[in-house]
Image (cartoon, helix red, strand yellow):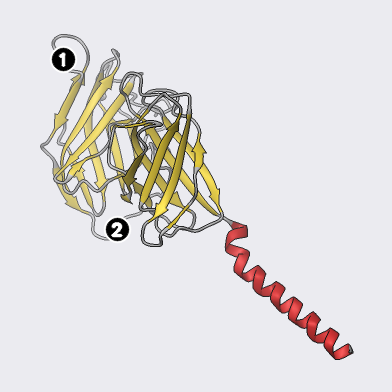
Amino acid sequence: LLYTIKFEKDMFYRSLVLACLLLAPYIAGIRYDLVYVTSNKDGAETTLEVWMRLLGVDTGLNTGVVTIPGHDEKGKVDEHNIEQAQDIGTPTMVWLKVEGVDAWWMAQFQVKKEGDDTWYTTETVDTRVADSQSIFCNLEPAIEYQVTTTTSTDENAETDHSVLLTLHGAEGSTRERNLDTPENDFLNGARDTFTFYDIDIGALECIQVKLDGTDGWKVAQIEVVMGKKQYATPSLEVFLDDEPEFRLDEKFCDLFVEDLGDNLNLVKNSPEVDASWKDSDTA
């Protein structure tokens, strides 16, 4: 009898240990960091609930439906995270739907899984998400872009307004991004560096900047590091302004290219603008 009791206790504890091992990944949960952008179109925002589900096509698994907050202002970048019991593998697709009669215009969606340094992103889609029109968007590995702007040392070269940037490459373009941050950027002579993630656009062909406001900005140079290459404009000294004799936006396609080889030390941060790299104490 004692032997039977001991055997049953041993089997119980072994079963308990096995169950804990099997359930550990589910109990711990997998975290997914999300970044989603509302389009700049008029009326793109919505105050209704937006439903989202991530899918791992290779595994056939999905996160189940969750609601994501925000998306209540056009052009807004929202960040959110979800704790999911099931690891779906590589997130290769996102499903979205709005609960209600209103619609949400999404510009881009990005996700990073806990334990994976890679961000996965959609293209710039600018698509309508509605109750009667749920959408599936493909996700692809994103690459890091490190952009450094140099403001001219001339008098009145600085600006307090936002600077918008788009990179154009041989295989596509990045989403237009607002490089303005809570920091005091774009001061006279300042070098400001921003980091973001987007689709691989291939070899960089043009850098487009646009001033979002009426306080003019004189740009001296722009540099972009992507992959193992650094692209740089020549000395520019171009003034962006809304006055008739100037332009609010410019596209610079005359670029120098340098192969950086393996001597890279890039920071993995948020996929949106990161102003933590400052070469000027005044910026």
Q: Which mark is residue 42?
A: none
Answer yes or no: do the residues labelled 2 and 1 have beta carbons within 8 Å?
A: no
* Residue wearing tag 1: 246
In the rendered structure, which disc, 2 or 1, sits on the residue that comes first in sequence?
1
Secondary structure of the residue carrying tag 2 is loop
The one nearer the camera, 12 or 108, is 12
The residue located at (36%, 57%) in the rendering is: 57
The one nearer the camera, 117 or 110, is 110
Give the spatial CA distance, label 2 vs label 1: 39 Å
Q: Is residue 167 above or below residue 262?
A: above
Quarter of the figure that contains the N terminus: bottom right
Residue 261 is drawn in which quadrant? Answer: bottom left
Secondary structure of the residue carrying tag 1 is loop
Looking at this view, name the residue that lies furthest to the right.
1
Q: In the image, which is nearer the foreground, mark 2 or mark 1?
A: 1
Q: At which x and y percent is residue 142?
A: 32, 49
Quarter of the figure that contains the C terminus: top left
Residue 34 is drawn in which quadrant? Answer: top left
The residue located at (25%, 42%) in the rendering is: 224
* Residue wearing tag 2: 263
Q: Type of residue at label 2? A: Asn
Would you say 260 lies left or right of 97 here? left
The residue located at (89%, 88%) in the rendering is: 2
Q: Is residue 70 above or below residue 56?
A: above
Looking at this view, name the residue that lies furthest to the left.
254
Q: Is residue 199 above or below residue 207?
A: below
The residue located at (28%, 60%) in the rendering is: 262
Q: At which x and y percent is residue 31?
A: 52, 51
Q: At which x and y percent is residue 8?
A: 79, 82
Would you say 228 lies left or right of 97 here? left
